Amino acid sequence: MSRRVARPAAGARPGAAARLTARGLVRRYGGIEAVAGVDLTAPAGRITALIGPNGAGKSTLFDCLAGTVRPDAGRVLLGGREVTRLPAHTRVRIGLARTFQQIAVFPTLSVADNVRVGAEQRPGTRRDTRAVDAATGGALALLGLQELAAQPAGEQPTGVLRLVELARALAGGPRVLLLDEPAAGLDTAQTARLVAVLRGLADRGMALLLVEHDPDLVAELADTVYAMADGRVVAHGPAGAVLADARVARTWGPDLRGGDPRP
Ligand SMILES: Nc1ncnc2c1ncn2[C@@H]1O[C@H](COP(=O)(O)OP(=O)(O)OP(=O)(O)O)[C@@H](O)[C@H]1O
């Protein structure tokens, strides 16, 4: 007798590698289409970068993917599962983590306790103190933060806080990681560590999607680049090709010439 076993969609199992997909995403603010019909895939095991000038819609797209903003149209899929209507905290529970452009740490908590907040989101660890300790310790070690573990987060410089935020996101055991300008405020050594850590995460199957303004870092890190302007994807493909694309140079010119992208 043959038995058919229902298999979950690829990547739908908790802990399994997963891709993040946007299909036809639209988000309007009044008369502005901040995100105007975006299709994007961040595959497992790859680093995908999102570039574009200020106001292109990158943060709004991130917010739609993370669940903090509800799109007006389109779909978001995590590992084949439709998550468009799931709130942000539920997406975290099924493996989607993010860091923010404006650093968001709890200043009165220690570095370790900030990371612990992420570890407590890890599926199945909420009441398992040892598992939470292990996830916290692992994330601190990965980012080289052990020596600062007991220090109040509020006393740390920006570069350290970026790493604390990343450690907190990683402590939750995500399958997909959204990073909004992860290298902003990092010194050269911290940036080198960040690059090595992100590459290592991708090599172990995580899907990474990052917003980044530094073209050198994008060229070094990203497998695939999506360039946005006026809410739309104007180019996507291998990093070298997109960074050399004339349409991208026109819209993202100041960044590519090494100027300050921020007004
Ligand atoms: N909460 C909001 N209310 C009204 N308009 C908004 C809101 N958030 C974004 N917008 C508008 O949507 C457009 C896209 O903004 P968004 O912040 O997503 O761009 P961005 O590419 O992330 O820019 P930056 O690189 O400066 O962060 C802009 O015109 C912006 O003014």
Image (cartoon, rainbow, N blue to C red):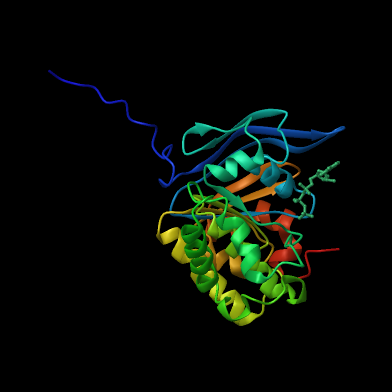
- In the picture as drawn, the residue positioned furthest to the left comes out as 1
Q: Residue visible at 20% across and 21% down?
A: 3
Question: Residue 216 at what x, y percent from top left?
Answer: 61, 70
Residue 53 drawn above or below residue 261: above
In the picture, residue 225 is in which quadrant? bottom right
Question: Residue 213 at what x, y percent from top left?
Answer: 69, 63
Q: Residue visible at 54% across and 75% down?
A: 193
Residue 144 drawn above or below residue 184: below
Residue 147 drawn above or below residue 89: below
> Quadrant of the image for the C terminus?
bottom right
Question: Residue 23 at what x, y percent from top left?
Answer: 58, 33
Foreground of the two, 49 or 144: 144
> Quadrant of the image for the N terminus?
top left
Foreground of the two, 234 or 220: 220
> Total of numbered circles in the picture?
0
Q: Is residue 167 left or right of residue 248?
A: left
Q: Residue visible at 70% across and 49% down?
A: 58
Q: Residue visible at 65% across and 45% down?
A: 234
**Residue 226 in view in this figure:** yes
**Residue 244 in view in this figure:** no
